[in-house]
């Protein structure tokens, strides 16, 4: 009954706004409040989402003060005054990770995992970042590998660094050895060794987000002879390496999951369609497998000319006409047969009677 009343209120509000020619704003229904945590200790850290992810200040290369504000989905750098030589090491690596890193293990990651394990094919991950102006830094995604299923100490196998952005006269460890097209983009490939192999992929055109299968970069490193298939993935991380500055850097959203451990389905219901504004609510996500799933991702393609303007009950992003919705921290775990719902608002060209259809759900 409560859900019915909520949808009725939303439909009424949208009808009034449509009549007035107004555009709705995103985030009609917010997730439960999360008390942010500020960390200023050099190696201070905390967990989020019930221990699923670990956020670390990791001010390892500098004595200057650095602080991060930890949210329910990621973190932001609120204070930093690094001033490191750009031909040397960075000042820090504030980051968020899943897996086991230096004796800290997150919950439910399934790591360490041997690369040759069939489940490794299904490891999917994403990150969305914000870059302020100024400073010298890179925005990187780290993939750590070890010959043994290590849960503590320093990895001795390889570190794959995926640079989404670099600002200033900095370069990866080692030397450039080629270029490659991976995950829908072109990358410079660098290789060096600092006691373990470091393979860096520097995106030719900077981006604020990436959504990919971890195997994409690991396979390329294997083919180059820098990683062995008998090795183990121990952790994945996303964050920043600042040399100069850089307050304002932020990981807005980070996700990690193993696709294939369960199954789910999604169906959408058109709850309101005005002249140019409509809502799909509810979009029901149901666990159709025999075991509990820890997360879900739903995708749907909007018709040409349609665009998203609001959502609730999920973290929703768009790429072209593709809408991707991921569970929030409180509604990802579903027992067999259990369901949860979310919704979104969109605008369309007037007089074009087309609506989204064909929802795809992937469990993790």
Image (cartoon, rainbow, N blue to C red):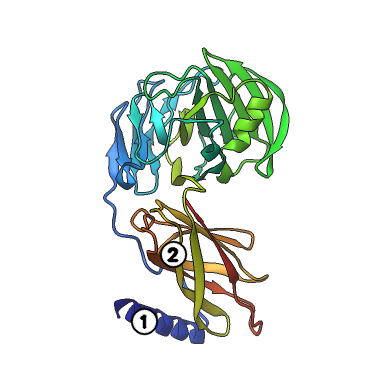
Q: From what the image shows, is residue 303 above or below residue 108?
A: below
| x and y, in percent, of residue 179 in the image | 73, 30
The numbered disc on residue 153 is: none
In this picture, residue 75 sits left or right of residue 261? left
For the residues marked 2 and 1, what is the alpha-carbon distance in whole angstroms? Answer: 25 Å
**Observer-nearest of 95 and 85:** 95
In this picture, residue 74 sits left or right of residue 34? right
Dot 2: within a 10 Å radius of its alpha carbon, few (fewer than 14), some, or many (20 or more) residues?
Answer: many
| x and y, in percent, of residue 232 in the image | 50, 27
Task: Please state which of the two labelled residues, at mark 2 or mark 1, is closer to the viewer.
Answer: 2
Q: From what the image shows, is residue 333 above or below residue 83?
A: below
| x and y, in percent, of residue 181 in the image | 71, 38
Q: From what the image shows, is residue 348 above or below residue 274?
A: above
Q: From what the image shows, is residue 104 above or below residue 290?
A: above
**Observer-nearest of 357 and 63:** 357
Going 65% across and 23% down the picture, which residue do you hit?
Answer: 190
- Of mark 2 and mark 1, the one earlier in the sequence is 1
Task: Specify the quadrant of the image occupied by residue 207.
Answer: top right
| x and y, in percent, of residue 103 in the image | 34, 25
Q: Which residue is identified by label 1?
A: 9
Dot 1: within a 10 Å radius of its alpha carbon, few (fewer than 14), some, or many (20 or more) residues?
Answer: few
Going 45% across and 69% down the picture, which residue do you hit?
Answer: 284
- Which element type, helix, strand or loop, lies under badge 1? helix
In this picture, residue 228 sits left or right of residue 20? right
Q: Which residue is identified by label 2?
A: 286
């Amino acid at each position: 009954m409560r859900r019915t009343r909520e949808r009725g209120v939303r439909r009424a509000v949208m009808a009034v706004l449509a009549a007035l020619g107004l555009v709705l704003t995103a985030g009609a229904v917010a997730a439960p409040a999360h008390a942010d945590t500020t960390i200023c200790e050099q190696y201070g850290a905390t967990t989020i989402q019930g221990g699923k992810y670990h956020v670390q200040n990791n001010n390892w290369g500098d004595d200057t003060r650095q602080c991060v504000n930890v949210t329910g989905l990621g973190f932001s750098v609120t204070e930093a005054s690094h001033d490191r030589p750009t031909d040397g090491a960075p000042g820090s690596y504030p980051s968020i990770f899943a897996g086991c890193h230096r004796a800290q293990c997150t919950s439910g990651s399934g790591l360490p995992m041997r690369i040759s394990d069939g489940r490794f094919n299904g490891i999917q991950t994403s990150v969305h970042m914000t870059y302020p102006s100024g400073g010298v830094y890179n925005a990187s995604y780290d993939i750590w590998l070890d010959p043994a299923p290590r849960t503590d100490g320093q990895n001795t196998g390889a570190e794959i660094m995926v640079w989404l952005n670099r600002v200033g006269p900095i370069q990866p460890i080692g030397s450039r050895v080629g270029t490659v097209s991976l995950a829908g983009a072109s990358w410079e490939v660098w290789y060096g060794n600092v006691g373990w192999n470091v393979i860096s992929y520097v995106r030719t055109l900077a981006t604020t987000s990436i959504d990919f299968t971890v195997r994409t970069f690991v396979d390329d490193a294997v083919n180059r002879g820098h990683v062995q298939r008998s090795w183990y993935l121990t952790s994945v991380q996303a964050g920043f390496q600042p040399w100069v500055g850089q307050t304002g850097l932020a990981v807005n959203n980070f996700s990690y999951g193993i696709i294939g451990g369960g199954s789910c389905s999604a169906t959408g219901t058109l709850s309101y369609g005005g002249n140019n504004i409509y809502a799909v609510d509810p979009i029901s996500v149901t666990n159709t497998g025999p075991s509990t799933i820890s997360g879900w991702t739903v995708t749907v393609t909007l018709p040409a000319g349609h665009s998203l303007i609001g959502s609730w009950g999920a973290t929703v992003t768009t790429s072209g006409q593709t809408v991707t919705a991921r569970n929030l921290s409180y509604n990802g775990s579903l027992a067999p047969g259990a369901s949860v719902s979310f919704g979104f608002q969109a605008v369309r060209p007037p007089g074009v009677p087309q609506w989204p259809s064909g929802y795809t759900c992937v469990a993790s």
